[in-house]
Amino acid sequence: MLRRIFPFFALSLCLVSCGQPEAPRPNVILISIDSLRRDYLGVYGREPLFAQGIELSPNLDALSAKSTVFDDAFTTTSWTLPSHVSLMTGLSDRHHGVEIDDYRRDPLHKTLAAGFHEAGYRTGGFFSGPYLDPKYGFGDGFDDYASGMMTPDDLAQRIQIWMTSNERQGGPPPPPSFAKVMRDRLSHLDITSPRVNAHADRFLSDVGQKPFFLFLHYFDAHYDHIPDAAELGLAGKFDPGYKGQMIGENWYFNGAVRSTTPPHERRISDRDLEHVQALYEAEIHWVDRHIGMILSQLEQSGLADNTIIAIVGDHGDEFFEHGSIGHRSTLYAELMRIPMILHIPGVADSGARVSSVSRIYDIAPTLLDFAGIPALPHSEGVSLRPELEGQSTQHGALGRIFFGSPSGPNIQDSWRNTRYTVIRGFGIDGNNSNAAGLAVRQKRANANGALLVFDRAEDPKEMHPLPQKDPRYQEAVKLFRVDFLQSEAMSASLPHSPIPHRWAPSKTAEEQATLDSLGYTSSDDDNGETQHMPPLKPFPAPNPAH
């Protein structure tokens, strides 16, 4: 079976066993596309809404034709920071504990990059969004880890323009915390794919004789949806007949899209919403083009035949499917189901599709496995090699979210297998919470039952929860309970640093450099010492009777 499906790697084994020189170890490229929905790629059946004659994702589709495509892959949450910690550690959010901005990767949890580095690989990582900053622990294991966002000088210049305008209008001087707010906001307006590619080009042009691991993070599909800022006229190509006034800038905060206060009632019309979706398609096309440039460079440099490539989305985006927009809000399919493509050179049955459930935290174990490198010592994810060899494995996909909002904390967890989805909501249990952790109490989801349970076989968009009396409801919760208890048992065995060792710095090096250039001193402070949110205590086990 191994030789039939993996001739490239079988050849390596033969050369060693026959006493001949060992074949070169494979290079590995991992590409993460921020905010990319699974159902917005051609390989998953998407065609542009209005752009006739234009392929939405031609380069990813072409790569998929000679790769393995995972049809039922899931992330761990609906926002960037926790999902990328899972991607890099092989751990779900419950296990790595980075569920809010206050925390960084636990130093005791080894990264994928460190695994490659210790195996003698040259490692490079280039990112383009604030949550991939080294302050969260992502730089560990990389020889070269750099940002593709605008430079601190450019950021300071934009902030200075804003500060001058604010001063003229009689506004108070902003506190140092405004640097992070402005960095986050301006990242939504930045165009970063060309800078990420410039970093990648430099890295690939100087790889030398050592095998390499390259991580690329593309952010331009993330809202705001402003494709004309990337390429003038790109928006018109994807919605040539649009006559309305809706724009993609300020998408998440635009009062013409939805009311600005909870419960955020929808105001945008169907046609205007389709226009924004077309802008999103244009940005995906832009990112696909830049990934195509990397793939072409591999071919031209002779590296393609010995390079494993993994493509993954970190989470999706919602366009009012469940009453909201953006992400970091729910755990429904449009946010949690992600594209996942794995290219292994020499695979005979290229273009294969895997229907069993896979998780974003399976990627690190899989890449290390195919590179012949020992697994991460505490990995929860598993190698997907059996799926590529035609063996279907059964395991559930766990998800969580912990987010504060004006209406109160948003705390949920989820579970999926090949048939069912279960989503739970929680509130804070004040009587059992303290500085060591926040306890939760389970909410009643709706009149049908304590949990939201969906039969994905007949309701893939998760719109119609099953009533509690339905036998499928009971079956799904029982299966969830088995995986949940197994996960909790593993969590108890994992090493964890003391909580203060897992706090992220209050400012990134970039934010501090920006503040320095604006005249703030290191003694400037917001309101005394930084206050950190306690971590979540363990959730109760799901109970079919509730």
Image (cartoon, rainbow, N blue to C red):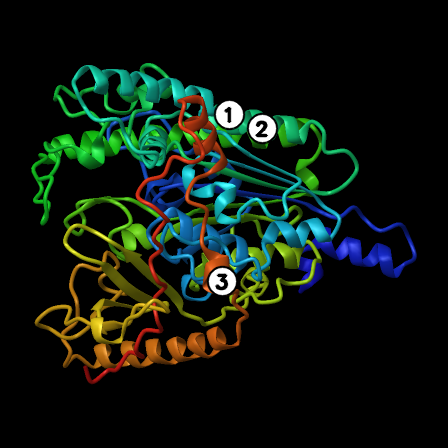
Residue drawn at x 16%, y 50% as measured from the top left: 406
Q: Which mark is residue 91?
A: 3
Mark closer to the chain start, 3 or 2: 3
Label 3 SS: loop
Cα distance, mark 1 to mark 2?
A: 6 Å
Quarter assignment of residue 475: bottom left
Q: Few, some or many C-alpha atoms within 10 Å of disc 3 (few <14, some 14-19, many ≥20)?
A: many
> In the shown orientation, is residue 142 left or right of residue 384?
right
* Amino acid type for the residue under numbered disc 1: Arg
* Disc ID at residue 195: 1
Residue 399: percent from left, percent from top: 35, 62
Q: Is the Cβ of the residue at disc 1 closer than 8 Å to that at disc 2?
A: yes
Q: Is residue 405 above or below residue 357?
A: above
Q: Is residue 41 above or below residue 256?
A: below
Q: Which mark is residue 339?
A: none
Q: Quadrant of the C terminus?
A: bottom left
Q: Amino acid at mark 3?
A: Leu
What type is the residue that disc 2 sits on?
His
Dot 2 crowding, Cα within 10 Å, few <14, some 14–19, many 20+? many
Q: Residue 115 in the image: state x and y as whole percent.
A: 66, 54
What element does badge 2 sit on? helix
Q: Would residue 86 appear left or right of 261 to someone viewing this image? A: right
| Side of 247 where 331 appears, left or right | right
* Disc number for residue 199: 2
Residue lying at the far bottom of the rendered structure: 545
Which secondary structure, mark 1?
helix
Marks 1 and 3, Cα distance to the nearest angstrom? 30 Å
Query: Disc 1, disc 3: CB below 8 Å?
Result: no
Q: Looking at the image, is 37 positioned above or below residue 48? A: below
Instruction: Residue at 61% x, 26% y: name it.
Output: 201
| The one of 165 and 136 positioned closer to us in this rendering | 165
